[in-house]
Image (cartoon, helix red, strand yellow):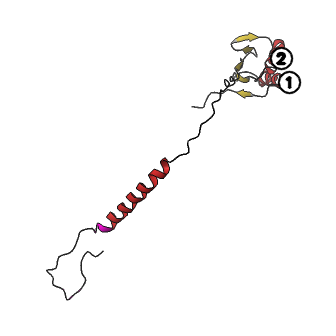
Amino acid sequence: MAFGTLDPSADADTEVMSEINMTPLVDVMLVLLIVFIVTIPILKQAVNVELPTATSQAQATKPETITLSVDAQGSYFWNQTQVSPEALGPMLSAEAGKTPQPELHIYGDKAARYEFVAQAMASAQQAGLKKIGFVTEPQR
């Protein structure tokens, strides 16, 4: 693909050829066209198969989420209902026996003593709950 000549004996009046040679591009496009024409009928040929029908069962329901809040005074709130520390253990045991087990989200007040939150965690562990998580506010 030459754009001009470097021959010093040539005239200065010879023109520089600045056109792109389109022949290779047309050749590539024709080859691609032939490839697509040949392969498309092959792709559309399929074996006709009669597929069986099946019924599916309803998907298992997601486990519920229990929120256990501990305020600054050490009071426990089970889904926004205040409960005594003595009643917390049996409630957690009852929830641990369910299938699927619910998730326990513990909301601890920033001013609450760690002792109250640790007691709630220990009660949940003794009850047999597997999914326990702490909920915090993101830093700003």
Q: Describe residue 107's horizontal placement relative to residue 121 as left or right.
A: left
Q: Describe residue 64's horizontal placement relative to residue 24 as left or right.
A: right
| Above or below: residue 137 compared with residue 29 | above
Q: Position of residue 26 (x, y in %)?
A: 32, 63
Q: Residue at x 65, y 29 (%)?
A: 54
Q: Position of residue 16 (x, y in %)?
A: 20, 75
Residue indicated by mark 1: 126
Looking at the rendered structure, the kind of residue marked 1 is: Gln
Q: Describe residue 53's horizontal placement relative to residue 11 as left or right.
A: right
Residue span colored magenta: 1-23
Residue indicated by mark 2: 89
Q: Residue at x 63, y 30 (%)?
A: 53
Picture quadrant of residue 79: top right
**Frontmost residue, 26 versus 37:** 37
Q: Position of residue 34 (x, y in %)?
A: 39, 59
Looking at the rendered structure, the kind of residue marked 2 is: Gly
| Above or below: residue 78 compared with residue 22 | above
Question: CB atoms at circles 2 and 1 under 8 Å apart?
Answer: yes
Q: Label 2 to label 1, Cα distance in Å? A: 8 Å
The numbered dot on residue 79 is none
What element does badge 1 sit on?
helix
Q: Quadrant of the C terminus?
A: top right
